[in-house]
Amino acid sequence: MYLAYWGLTKYPFENVPDPEFMFYSSEHEEALMRIAYGIERNKGAILLTGEVGCGKTTLSRVLIQQLAAQEHKFDIGLVANPSLESTEFLVESLYQLGITSPSNTKTDLLRALNTRLLENVKKNLNTILIIDEAQAIYKNTFEEIRMLLNFQMNDRYLLNLVLVGQPELRDIIREIKQLDQRIAIRYHLNPLSNKDTVNYILFRLEKAGGTKEIFSPEALQEVYNYSGGVPRKINNLCDLALLVGFGEKARTIDNKVVSKVIKDSL
């Protein structure tokens, strides 16, 4: 609705995990580097946590995109909704890896997975299972996940698990000692700093085709004050600010427009 008015070609503040709009703060770069290292070195279990709305899911999609670009190196599966009983979780995991099993019994599922893992080793393929929203995993299913790490050879894990979730995931895993001890790589994403919030907004506007200053410095500060640097909150606020500014035929988004949006949101 407001694209032409602001000289944009795409909506810049959509809350979807679009890798094109991935902003690399220093923490996001560090997280990607650690996860990539864990995968390359077959570390087995990797844990990425972060506050709600801080870009964990987008980061996981960027990771998948980067790995998929390296042809004939990785076999990747993504479980986006892990709120499943243990056997259902195995069925979903195999499905996402493109593995067929003669039945959905646990024995057949594990045999089918083992066969694929060994085949991938022969092909020099690294098998990766990414589990998003992992804080929602049922307690008994965590035991199944721990057992998946038993697929290993003398010098390497056959399956790399990347667990992605909200901060409480750290506490959940700490209570499962045998799983906690197998987490080789850990990283926690925090909200953006004031400076990174400004750069994030400008980056997304540029990615959306923006060529002029749309948000005043005071407006950018107001966005940070309200959002606390949480990308999802930034997106919601900036999107509505552009809409309200369009409706008022504003020349720029100033702190008055942002304050109006904030007031209407309370």
Image (cartoon, rainbow, N blue to C red):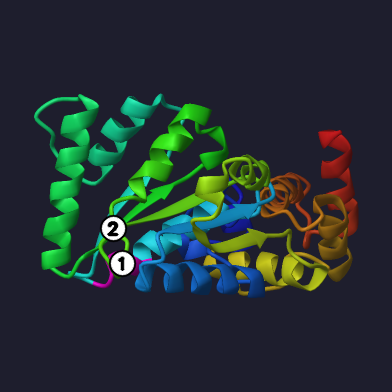
Q: Tag 1, which secondary structure?
A: loop
Could you tell me if the residues under marks 1 and 2 are in contact, i.e. CB atoms within 8 Å? yes
- Residue matched to label 2: 152
Q: Which mark is residue 127?
A: none
- Residue matched to label 1: 156
Image location (x, y in percent) of residue 158: 27, 59
Q: Tag 2, which secondary structure?
A: loop
Please tell me which residue is depicted at 20% across the width and 44% down the height of the picture.
Answer: 113
Q: Using the image as rendered, state which of residue 96 and residue 137 is in the foreground.
A: 137
Please tell me which residue is depicted at 36% across the width and 63% down the height of the picture.
Answer: 65
Residue 111's place in the image compared with 211, above or below, is above
Image location (x, y in percent) of residue 93: 30, 39
Q: Amino acid at mark 1?
A: Arg
Q: Using the image as rendered, state which of residue 156 and residue 53 is in the foreground.
A: 156
**Bounds of the magenta segment:** 66-70
167 vs 146, left or right, is right
Q: Work out which quarter of the rendered image holds the N terminus and state it.
A: top right
Location of residue 210 (image quadrant): bottom right
Image location (x, y in percent) of residue 154: 27, 66
Q: For the residue carrying disc 2, how many other residues have a C-alpha within 10 Å: few (<14), some (14-19), or many (20+)?
A: some
Residue 105's place in the image compared with 202, above or below, is above
Location of residue 157 (image quadrant): bottom left
Q: Amino acid at mark 2?
A: Gln
Please name the predominant secondary structure of the magenta segment in the image.
helix
149 vs 135, left or right, is left
Separation of residues labelled 1 and 2 (CA atoms)? 6 Å
- Residue 5 falls inside the magenta stretch: no
Please tell me which residue is depicted at 46% across the width and 56% down the height of the picture.
Answer: 60
